[in-house]
Amino acid sequence: MLQKTHGLAGLLAAELVVFHQGVPLLSWEAAGALLIGCFAGPLADVDKPGSVMAKIFFPLSALLHVLKVKHRTLTHSILIVILLGLAASPLPPLYYWSFLLAYATHPLIDLLNERGVQLLWPLRFKIRLLPKVLAIDTGSLAEVAFRWLVAAAAVLLLLVKLDIARF
């Protein structure tokens, strides 16, 4: 999936955390959490040379390259989510959960791609949720539709929270 899809999924995850914790939407805390979500969603692609995250975190990306860490392996695994959860534990709960859940959306969404993810890295097999025929190719029309669904969910959640729409 593309960075914008992962960024939107991260935003939606952070939005859910903000609303769950009862943080006023029009506050610096909510703005910080949503920004963290937009940033953490695509962060797992730091292992992909040329990606925006690899450019922003070039030293880390270069280290992963030197260590021969392949795309959709370590940075997309349950192990790294656990390690990041431990490393981020000093953060306040709002920012901790926004970061961790937004980051976790990345490998979850990539499970919809035909190439799958080494979710149980260092085990070498890849997992995917959809058969190849239904899988969502990166940059495809199916991904655009998926991205619109994620965006619609984020807007709908906002409207429900602001009591503009009721379900």
Image: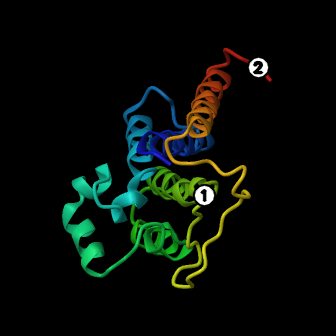
Which of 17 and 120 lies nearest the eye of the viewer?
Answer: 120
Which of 9 and 109 lies nearest the eye of the viewer?
Answer: 109
What residue do we see at 37% from left, 76% from top? 69
User: Percent position (x, y) of residue 75?
Assistant: 44, 69
What residue do we see at 72% from left, 52% from top? 133
Return the residue at label 2: 166
Q: Is mark 2 on a helix, strand or loop?
A: loop
Query: Which quadrant is home to the C terminus?
Result: top right
Residue type at the position of mark 1: Leu
Q: What element carries label 1?
A: helix
Residue type at the position of mark 2: Arg
Residue 128 to residue 28: above or below: below
User: Percent position (x, y) of residue 126?
Assistant: 60, 73
Quick one: label 1 or label 2, which is nearer the N terminus?
1
Which of 131 and 156 lies nearest the eye of the viewer?
Answer: 131
Q: In this view, does 9 lie to the left or right of 71?
A: right
Q: How far apart are marks 1 and 2 (CA)?
A: 29 Å
What residue do we see at 59% from left, 64% from top? 116
Residue 134 to residue 74: above or below: above
Q: Quadrant of residue 32?
A: top left
Return the residue at label 1: 108
Which residue, as the protein is rendered here, is positioned at the far right?
Answer: 167
